[in-house]
Amino acid sequence: MTRLRVAIDARRLQDEPLGGVGRSLAGLVDLLAAEVDIVLLTDARRPPIDTTIAQFALAPPLCAPELAWIQWNVPRWLRGFRGVFHGTFNQLPWRSPVPAVVTIHDLSFEVHPEGMGRAKRRAFQLQARRAARVATRVVAPSQFTRRELIEQYHLSPERVVVTPWGTEARFGPQQAMALGPTASPARRRRALRGGDGRCTPPRARRRGCGVALRARGHRHRPRRRRP
């Protein structure tokens, strides 16, 4: 049986440092690669992704906005692709030559418009609304977002599916289990948030901040004590 082929918008994996969408995607691509054949579509103006998964760098004009990449380069590349395209950040090509799936992470730009400037908010609205209309399936990270998509965009419930965000390996129960049965609940919670579960003393935290500031050229000025 032929495996499904999926081309993924992987630009958020090129962000430095990775944002929330990039970190979520990084926690999912290896799992997806075990089930389907994945191709990562990237922006040729930025460094490639450090992965063994196949990737194709698409090159829009040097000074063009990201919108040109999704609306011009991606549809042209997809003409020769036999598979599905997954828009991972609220966007799809307006005219896709292949079936498409879009992940819409939230609708803050619709229900809380005061949180964005007018131009950015309008761009997000146009892209997400169009993507929700043309997508074969719309992916939401939570039941709450799914309900908002159905209500705000009047989508049929069967078109909207929930797939929780992916997590990095360090944010897992294995970290807490590795501490052993004698570890305190507080240390286990810190391990689940990342790290080895140890608490950094306040003095050490202040010392670390001072080293970082001096490395950036800031001079330390000791605090004067009151007489």
Image: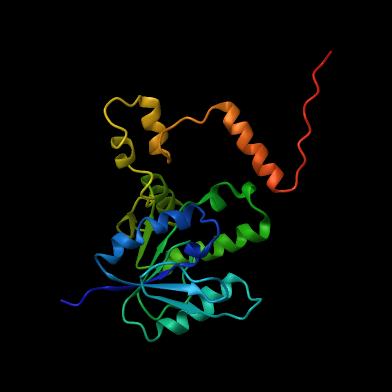
Q: Is residue 6 above or below residue 120?
A: below
Q: Residue furthest right?
A: 227
Find the residue positioned furthest to the top.
Answer: 227
Name the outermost residue toward the left. 1
Which residue does the image show at 26% across and 69% down from the upper left? 36
Provide residue 167's location: percent of width, then percent of height.
38, 49
Image coordinates for residue 188, horizontal then vertical, percent: 36, 31
Q: In the image, what residue occupies the spot 69% across and 42% down?
A: 213
In the rendered image, which quarter is residue 24 located in? bottom left
Closer-to-camera residue (152/25): 25
Quadrant where the image shows the C terminus: top right
> In x, y percent, where is residue 216?
71, 48
- Say which quadrant the N terminus sits in: bottom left
- Tell me the residue at 65%/41% (across/down): 211
In this image, 156 relative to 75: left or right? left
Say which residue appears at 67% left-offset and 61% top-offset: 119
**How far from the left and from the top, in percent, is residue 115?**
62, 47
Number of marks in picture: 0
Report the front residue among 127 and 21. 21
- Asked which colour scheme the image uses, the reply is rainbow
